Amino acid sequence: MSDKYLELKTTDNLTVWIKKDHVSAVEEVPSTSRSEGYVRVYVNGYKFNIKEKTAEEILSQL
């Protein structure tokens, strides 16, 4: 099952499973003085703010 899905942890501390072929885009949002940086993953009309992984790590798993 893990070869078809990505297991990611959101900034809200939720674990989401995303099917690899449904990922539309990956965007890295830089940190500012008010917020930490995170990676935004777009999936068929939804977006997930992901912590703990960089954009390069997510793209290498696709």
Image: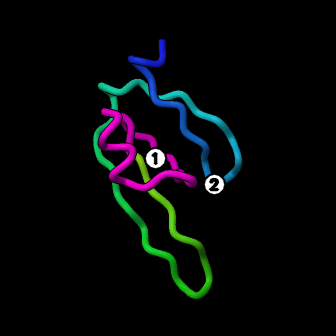
In the visual, does 44 lie left or right of 11?
left
Classed neighbour count for the residue bearing mark 1: other residues with Cα under 10 Å, few (<14), some (14–19), many (≥20) = some
Colour scheme shown: rainbow
Q: Quadrant of the C terminus?
A: top left
C-alpha distance separating marks 1 and 2: 12 Å
Residue 43 at what x, y percent from top left?
38, 37
Q: Is residue 29 above or below residue 20?
A: below
Q: Examine the structure image and report whether residue 57 is included in the region drawn in magenta.
A: yes
In the visual, does 46 lie left or right of 16?
left
User: What kind of element bears circle 1?
Assistant: strand
The residue under the point 58% across, 72% down is 36
Q: Nearer the viewer, residue 10 or 54?
A: 54
Q: Is residue 4 above or below residue 60?
A: above
Please state the extent of the stretch shown in magenta in the rendering.
Answer: 42-62
Residue type at the position of mark 2: Thr
In the visual, does 4 lie left or right of 51?
left
The residue under the point 50% across, 47% down is 48
Residue type at the position of mark 1: Lys
Any mark on residue 61, and which? Answer: none
Q: Nearer the viewer, residue 58 or 41?
A: 58
Mark positioned earlier in the residue sequence (1 or 2): 2
Mark nearest the camera among 1 and 2 is: 2
Residue 32 at what x, y percent from top left?
52, 83
Question: For mark 1, what is the residue?
Answer: 47
The residue under the point 50% across, 62% down is 38
Residue 5 at what x, y percent from top left?
44, 23
